[in-house]
Amino acid sequence: MPINKIAPTKRGKAAVAASVAFAIGTGWAALYSGSAPDTPAKVRAAIAKGYTPPAVQLAIDKLIKPWEGIHLSAYRDIVGVPTICWGETKGIRMGMTKTLAECDAMLRDRVINDYYLPLVDNGRNFLKAPDSVQASMISGAYNFGVGSTNPRRGQLGSTAMVIHIPAGEYRKACEAQTAWNKAGGQIINGLVKRREMGDAQRLGEAELCVSGL
């Protein structure tokens, strides 16, 4: 269970409203006979046409970028893994450098292909969840791993994805993700803030999650 009280906020609701405007403005919300893509096949077809899913954009802008921060030169993260850009670790070696444009493009492609689509393909009823819930789950997967359903690990094996989202228990899913607040077996205050209600400058995952319910 969360350490702190989880509640919707004005800034969380504003972020959700901006995501709705993004869906309408980009045409995502009316791609298929006046409705947003609602199956994995339709989602993949829309992405292939160059569309960005609103939940992905919401996760990137309001959760991933603010918490990861930007580093144009490779550094070692809290557990010693070479990292660059917006928290990218795949194929990164110390000494690497990137431009901001390269980092942004890398982040979008990575989030869509390695985190969002696996949740879409393997998470039961994931596309039925509100964008705020999807964005929170995407952000969590980006931070602690997308995992798998068998064996149960990472986001795909989490209580939120396996039990609560399939049942439409979205608030419970928002709160269940807050359990991922440890590094090296210890509760980390920064992860508590990231998973729960954020800080003065940044939204927390659960905060955004429940603000869209």
Image (cartoon, helix red, strand yellow):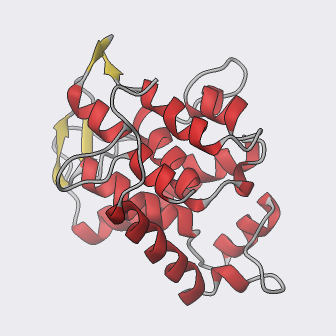
Residue 41 in the image: above or below residue 83: below
Residue 194 percent location from the top left of the image: 31, 40
Relative to 44, 203 lies left or right: left
Going 67% across and 54% down the picture, which residue do you hit?
A: 129
- State the count of labels: 0
Residue 203 percent location from the top left of the image: 31, 53
Q: Is residue 85 visible?
A: no
Q: Residue furthest top?
A: 185
Going 54% across and 89% down the picture, which residue do you hit?
A: 25
Residue 130 in the image: above or below residue 123: below
Relative to 26, 63 lies left or right: left
The quadrant in which the C terminus is found is bottom right
Q: Is residue 111 visible?
A: yes
Q: Quadrant of residue 3?
A: top left
Residue 142 percent location from the top left of the image: 45, 43
Front-most of residues 184 and 72: 184
Front-most of residues 123 and 197: 197
Going 31% across and 66% down the picture, which residue do you hit?
A: 102
Residue 88 percent location from the top left of the image: 34, 46
